[in-house]
Image (cartoon, grey):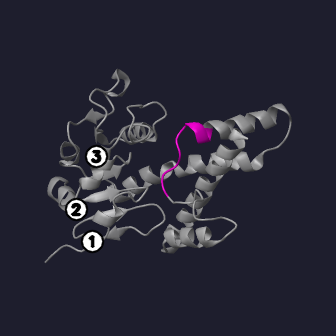
Amino acid sequence: SKHAINAFLATSVTFINEIARLCERLGVDAKEVERALKSEERIGPKAYLSPGAAFAGGTLARDLKFLEQFGRHHRVPTPLVSGALASNDAHKQWTAERVRAMVGGMATPTIAVLGLTYTPGTSTLRRSSSVELCRRLHGSGATVRAHDPAISVLPESLREQIKLCATTLDALRGADVAVVATEWPEFRRLTASDFTSTMRRARVVDPGAFLLASLSGQPGVEYATTGRPTVIGESKQ
């Protein structure tokens, strides 16, 4: 039952993220679709249907893989379970793709990554989607600067790929793009001016819309989040 519950939640996450990517292509807001889904009494307001980042390799992915392997062992096809895993893997590219679009053909951009841990409130880097992203960005030629409130020292295996900064503003300083990777409450205190005054150009990728209220439409800020058209705030004259 527990495997089935987590697999259902995981499938819900991948479903809404696929819908969100379609919404982006059409230039509409996936949150409107989310509201419509949750207003349907057979789905309900607590459904796992908020556009955002892909889930990492923790409980949801683990239980999907268990059911896939269990089905294979007993020769029972599980195309829906396998499809949810494939969809989530595809969505893991979303953030890196938005970063690439923002920097264009820049050969060695500097990317500020806010948050490294698997989830807020822990110091766990194992199975962290943020760490996966940092590796991917570094592998594509970017300089990666990061800050996480719970991390003071990086494992040796990551030190060549990530420059750890003591504060959020240190990580942002001189960056070409910032990514909100782990939604630590401390990051809520950031304002649009924190980005515009420190970054080379204030371009922010925020998969879960964590800073939507403070950044979207702000002058001088280019802001991208899952399921919405990228917003470029007009600079003050």
Of 74 and 93, which appears nearest the observer?
A: 74
Of 5 and 104, which appears nearest the observer?
A: 5
| Residue under the point 28% across and 64% down | 214
Q: Which residues are magenta?
A: 52-61
Could you tell me if the residues under marks 3 and 2 are in contact, i.e. CB atoms within 8 Å?
no
Residue 104 visible: no
List the residue tagged with mark 1: 233
Query: How far across and down, in percent of the image, does residue 142 sit?
Result: 32, 42
**Spatial distance from mark 1 to mark 3, Cα to Cα?**
20 Å
Would residue 4 appear left or right of 195 to someone viewing this image? right
Q: Amino acid at mark 3?
A: Ala
Vertical comparison of 106 with 41: above or below: above
Mark 2 or mark 1, which is nearer the start of the sequence?
2
User: Viewer-nearest of labels 3 and 2?
Assistant: 2
Would residue 162 appear left or right of 9 to someone viewing this image? left
User: Callout 1: few (<14), some (14-19), or many (20+) C-alpha neighbours within 10 Å?
Assistant: some
Could you tell me if the residues under marks 1 and 3 are in contact, i.e. CB atoms within 8 Å?
no
List the residue tagged with mark 2: 192
Q: Label 2, secondary structure: give it.
A: helix
Could you tell me if the residues under marks 1 and 2 are in contact, i.e. CB atoms within 8 Å?
yes
Would residue 142 appear left or right of 227 to someone viewing this image? left
Q: Is residue 55 magenta?
A: yes
User: Quadrant of residue 71 in the image?
Assistant: top right
List the residue tagged with mark 3: 112
User: Quadrant of residue 136 in the image?
Assistant: top left
Vertical comparison of 132 with 111: above or below: above
Name the dominant secondary structure of the magenta segment: loop
| Residue under the point 60% across and 54% down | 14
Mark 2 or mark 3, which is nearer the start of the sequence?
3
Mark 3 or mark 1, which is nearer the start of the sequence?
3
User: Callout 3: few (<14), some (14-19), or many (20+) C-alpha neighbours within 10 Å?
Assistant: many
